[in-house]
Image: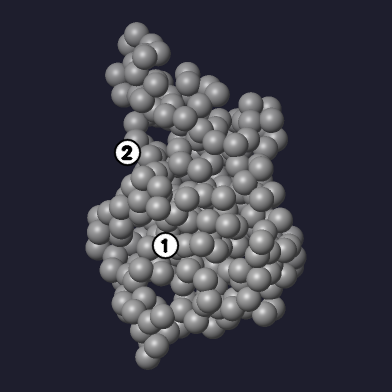
């Protein structure tokens, strides 16, 4: 029986594929602890009398876009938004009463972003700055109180296995010199998928696998690999890449690109490694009056002054 190293004999020589397989399995083992259900639609069964405007999918999308803008201003990773939205989804699912008040929902969203940045980025954002970014609708004390409540409810589970983490692992299975461009194409889809409520309920490993499959489909050169790519991915992820669920996610990811007028550039050997033709950066309009500096220390703190500089 062929082992994993044999299956990946044509992949990057710099990758320990047995360790990579262990990493993928470890991510999948943790995946279930961070899954959420369809809490927004279940909310309709628990409506509180007098609630006129409960939180809906559009509210979630708008707060996700707001978080993206903050992250982009600060030159942080958009993966942090994926983590913040996962934290928010789990928090809301465990506290459906929060869905009855859009103002409380906004406070929860801001708090989840603040906590995520504090944990996952090299530079934190100060509480005063977060309050300022909310146009001082929410105070420092309110954010602190919400953070304590949120952490208790999600049992301090702040390290979800993200679609990006799975995507990086899957792309490392590909031949050296090809995995970077395919990951860039994968990342475009995963960043847009953060805002998709339906995809938030799918296992991150499934979403990442579907995005990689779409990325590979967009190239018109043969990968120098001895075994079919699908075989490698299936072996590593233990997911059938041709299952109906994966194919449906592939369609959703493509639809997300179409909705934002984003076209994955067709890659061939002549432009491999160059995806500058994509208009993805136009998705988020960044207010010109706001900017953010790179951190000056491993654990510096952003303030309102540095954001306005």
Give the answer, above or below, for where 37 lies relative to 271: above
Q: Nearer the viewer, residue 118 or 28?
A: 28
How far, Cα to Cα, is label 2 from label 1? 28 Å
Q: Earlier in the sequence, mark 2 or mark 1?
A: 2
| Labelled pair 2, 1 in contact (Cβ < 8 Å) | no
Task: Give residue 20's position: percent from left, percent from top.
Answer: 68, 62
Task: Give residue 93's position: percent from left, percent from top.
Answer: 50, 26
Give the answer, above or below, for where 144 lies relative to 81: above
Q: Residue shown at 60%/57% (left/top)?
A: 236
Give the answer, above or below, for where 4 lies relative to 83: below
Is 295 placed left or right of 134 in the picture? Answer: right
What residue does disc 1 label?
213
Q: Residue furthest bottom?
A: 270
Q: Nearer the viewer, residue 235 or 77?
A: 235
Task: Give residue 39's position: percent from left, percent from top.
Answer: 43, 27
Q: Residue shown at 61%/71% (left/top)?
A: 8
Q: Is residue 290 visible?
A: no
Q: Residue shown at 66%/71% (left/top)?
A: 6
How many neighbours does mark 2 have within 10 angstroms: few (below 14), some (14-19), or many (20 or more)?
Answer: few
The quarter of the picture where the N terminus appears is bottom right
Q: Nearer the viewer, residue 47 or 7?
A: 7
Q: Is residue 241 visible?
A: yes
Q: Secondary structure at mark 2?
A: helix
How many neighbours does mark 1 have within 10 angstroms: few (below 14), some (14-19), or many (20 or more)?
Answer: many
Residue 58 is labelled as 2
Q: Residue shown at 36%/25% (left/top)?
A: 41
Residue 155 is labelled as none
């Amino acid at each position: 029986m062929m082992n994993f190293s044999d299956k990946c004999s044509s992949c990057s020589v710099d990758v320990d594929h047995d360790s990579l397989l262990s990493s993928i399995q470890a991510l999948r083992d943790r995946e279930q602890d961070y899954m959420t259900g369809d809490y927004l639609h279940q909310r309709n069964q628990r409506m509180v009398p007098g609630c006129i405007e409960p939180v809906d999918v559009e509210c979630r999308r708008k707060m996700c876009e707001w978080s993206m803008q903050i992250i982009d201003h600060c030159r942080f990773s958009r993966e942090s938004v994926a983590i913040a939205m996962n934290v928010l989804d789990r928090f809301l699912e465990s506290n459906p009463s929060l869905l009855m008040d859009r103002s409380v929902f906004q406070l929860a969203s801001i708090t989840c972003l603040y906590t995520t940045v504090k944990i996952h980025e090299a530079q934190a954002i100060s509480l005063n700055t977060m309050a300022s970014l909310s146009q001082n609708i929410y105070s420092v004390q309110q954010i602190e109180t919400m953070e304590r409540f949120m952490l208790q409810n999600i049992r301090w589970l702040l390290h979800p296995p993200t679609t990006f983490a799975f995507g990086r692992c899957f792309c490392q299975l590909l031949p050296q010199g090809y995995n970077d461009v395919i990951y860039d194409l994968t990342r475009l889809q995963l960043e847009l998928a953060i805002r998709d409520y339906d995809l938030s309920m799918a296992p991150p490993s499934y979403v990442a696998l579907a995005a990689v499959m779409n990325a590979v489909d967009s190239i018109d050169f043969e990968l120098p690999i001895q075994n079919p790519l699908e075989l490698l991915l299936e072996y590593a992820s233990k997911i059938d890449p041709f299952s109906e669920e994966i194919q449906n996610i592939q369609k959703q990811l493509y639809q997300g690109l179409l909705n934002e007028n984003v076209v994955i550039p067709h890659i061939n050997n002549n432009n491999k490694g160059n995806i500058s033709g994509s208009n993805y950066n136009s998705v988020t309009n960044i207010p010109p009056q706001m900017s953010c500096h790179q951190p000056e220390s491993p654990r510096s703190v952003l303030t309102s002054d540095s954001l306005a500089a």
